[in-house]
Amino acid sequence: MDANVPPRLELTGITKQFPGVLANDRVSFSVRPGEIHALLGENGAGKSTLVKMIYGIMQPDAGEIRWDGAVVGIPNPRAARRLGIGMVFQHFSLFEALTVLENIALGMDAKIPARQLEAKIREVMAQYGLALEPRRIVSTLSVGERQRIEIVRALLLDPRLLIMDEPTSVLTPQEVEQLFVVLRQLASEGCSILYISHKLDEIKALCDTATILRGGRVVDTCDPKAETSRSMAEKMIGGNLKDIVKQPAREFGEPAFAVRNLSLPAVGPFGTSLEDISFTVRKGEIFGVAGVAGNGQNELLLALDGEVASAPGAIEMAGRPVGQLHATGRRKRGLCAVPEERNGHAAVGDFTLSENSVLTARDRLGMVSAGLIRAGAAKTFTGEVIAAFAVKALGPGATAGSLSGGNLQKYIMGREILQKPEVLVVNQPTWGVDAGAAAAIHQALVDLAAAGSAIVVISQDLDELLKLCDTLAVINEGRLSAKMNVGEVSIEEIGLLMGGVHGTAQETHIAPGGEHAVPA
Amino acid sequence: MQFRLERRAEPSRLMLYAAPVAAVLLTMVLGAVIFSLMGYNGVGAVIEIFTRPITNPLKWQDLGIKAAPLIIIGVGLAIAYRANVWNIGAEGQYVAGAMAGTAVALLTMGMEGPWILPAMIVAGVLGGMLWGAIPALLKTQLDVNEILTSLMLNYAIIQLLGYLLRGPWRDPMGFSFPQTPLFTASQSLPYLWRGTIMHWGVPIALVVALLAWFVMSRSVFGFQVKVVGSAPNAARYGGFSAKRTIWLALLVSGGLAGLAGILEAAGPFRQLVPGFNTGYGFTAIIVAFLGRLNPLGAIAAGLVLAITYVGGEIAQTTIGLPSAATGIFQALMLFLLLAGDIFVRYRLKAVAPRPAGEAA
């Protein structure tokens, strides 16, 4: 490496103080041109704050940022983009009711005629092999597709540093590979990449350097290829990582949860219909549902937890039909669930944690008598969840919105698991959650199964399913494959099932500058 | 210097309570300016309207009987709005309640007994509920926007009232005036004390507000209303039916508006006349928002709005302000309140103007 070339980005002594928290404490590291640099750390380690300062959303209290060797101030994101810094956020900032093209146009600093922009978008997509139809309405897109909008939006600016905030948490192995191809291509063209993640295998596969943050400080800068995933994880959490403790050969009990020929029509013009889904989960069994984002996982969760009713016999618990019951009725019979979206679905951000406990645990745990809420019972239970799941929160009176994503997820999982459900259905249990919290959630699920509950885990993270589950099936376009034993499956087979009809969609030819998309 | 609205990390609790106070104070300032520009003594008008009803003990009874219907209706609307159900048909539900109660009164004209007034009140509540049920049915079955249906039903019921007063309900001894016969003693709301004009509607309003506060803060029903209003998906996940909540919200707010209607008919009016509807149902929308959609807040807000009514009447006689002044002050208040509410979620931030050539 030519020592005379200054780093693309160099941070020296960056410090940021929030009321009560030192979010970044004299953080220093540098990113060379064309380098893929990982930024690792648990939730709350200060990654987001640091990145927000690089992207001009916040200003550091102390320290300096150098860009190509020159000290720069980055007062706002527009200034960052002018320097050539692009960013793909973990939470997408997209207008649901607008098309892909309109969303991208709105994010551009310069006003480009729509036709020209569309041509440029198609060109960038063809160059990097990203499949996306510019005329589609965002609300109809899967999470993976929405991320592609953000990537295209960043690439249109010809960035010289691309910041990716937890980009793979919603992608399939194939999609992750595709993304890595894009990122490697970008890096080879000289673009630096700051890659924020806590998926250590990916960092080992992709990144040249990793800077590890803990408690706002840099604890190490290392070569991820020379480290093990475990050694990096332990630096990240500052302690020993616990493995999932799982009984090697477990006996499963009687069928606890059975779905028979469940079919539901699609809701909305681009919703996914569920087609003839059948599976059985026994007591003590963890059953995984793998699949690419947007193949009916959300619809399946809504049907299973009672938010959408179905034919009575389509869903049975311990042999009794519950398909006609709504969420409250199923919960009383012992079915708890955790949907994917934390804010506004699994929890209400404006409500306190205690009130969020009332939301789902009121009937099972006696938080209601004579139509009145027993606030004391809710508070006690919430305190138990906070303690048992090491939720970082000010207490049961903290609003759900004040918790970080990982902590809120731990609270939500804890709230459902501590209700000791007979059947637990979870969708994306660890999405956007750091390694320490994910390990805690996985262990809690395994322990719950060991105590005799039947568990359904819907996840787009195949590694998670292979680690956690006893049995597995793949959902594609609303159809569920046959059930397989995790010990006997091949990754290739699962990959093919996940691809399904979707595989052809991703190979859809994109005509650069074409007026009409080739339909998938 | 330029200004920019910046989203707050959390809604500001201070601004939540400061906004209504600021709105009332700004209403006085702007009102003074407007009436000065119109050639009146603007400052004097504001003093007449906002302080005279408070400083003159003779007007306190007026305040009470004006505030009572506003509080009762405002409490119901606060509950509906919490559920994100935008019932702006309280005016019609108020009339419907008065009409249903009056129907009972007309049927019991020759009778006596302590059961008659309670029966009228029950009928009033049911009448308001019935008029609220129409938008609920249309919303839940056909997904018709309740703002439109509830608003339009106001005009429908007023036409119906006009028909009844000129036709079947007209007092045969009333010299052809379009009005019902006067209610008998058994059909009228008694006064609190001999020699006052304060009727039982005033304590009923306070009890309604306190009960509603208790229900909203402590009961599963209140919880349901708040969850459905702030996070519909979470509500469905928690097992609360959105349709049920829409029904409940419209029945409760309609029923309370109906209660206010029959109390007003059996109290100050003692009959139904074409001018029965005086816009309480619309003013109560301001009460609900000024009271922060909180039933206890509605008591304070109801008093503030009552002050504008009573003060407006005083200012008509003392400084010749037009009767529309009350409406102007009330509208200003709602307008300023809604404008002020943006600072609950956003803060105003001064930003240095961008150097030339950088503007988009």
Image: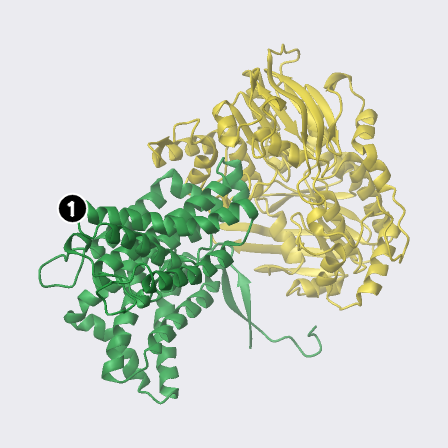
Q: Give whichever of A269, B352 is nearer the camera.
A: A269
Crowding near pointer 1: few (<14 within 10 Å), some, many (20+)? few
> Residue A351: x and y, percent?
45, 45
The yellow one among the chains is: A
Q: Give whichever of A179, A302 is nearer the camera.
A: A302
Amino acid type shown at disc 1: Pro
Residue B297 appears in the figure: no
> Residue A284: x and y, percent?
59, 16
The green one among the chains is: B
Q: How many marks?
A: 1
> Residue A2: x and y, percent?
86, 54
Q: Quadrant of residue B38?
A: bottom left
Horizontal side of A75 relative to A187 (left or right) equals left
Residue A112 appears in the figure: yes
Q: Residue at x 31, y 44 (%)?
A: B214
**Chain ID for label 1?**
B
Horizontal side of A40 relative to B101 (left or right) equals right
> Residue A259: x and y, percent?
64, 22
Horizontal side of A149 relative to A60 (left or right) equals right
Q: Residue at x 42, y 38 (%)?
A: A354
**Furthest residue toward bottom:** B39
Which residue position is annotated with label 1?
B114
> Which quarter of the rendered picture does the C terminus of chain A lie within?
top right
Q: Quadrant of residue A178?
A: top right
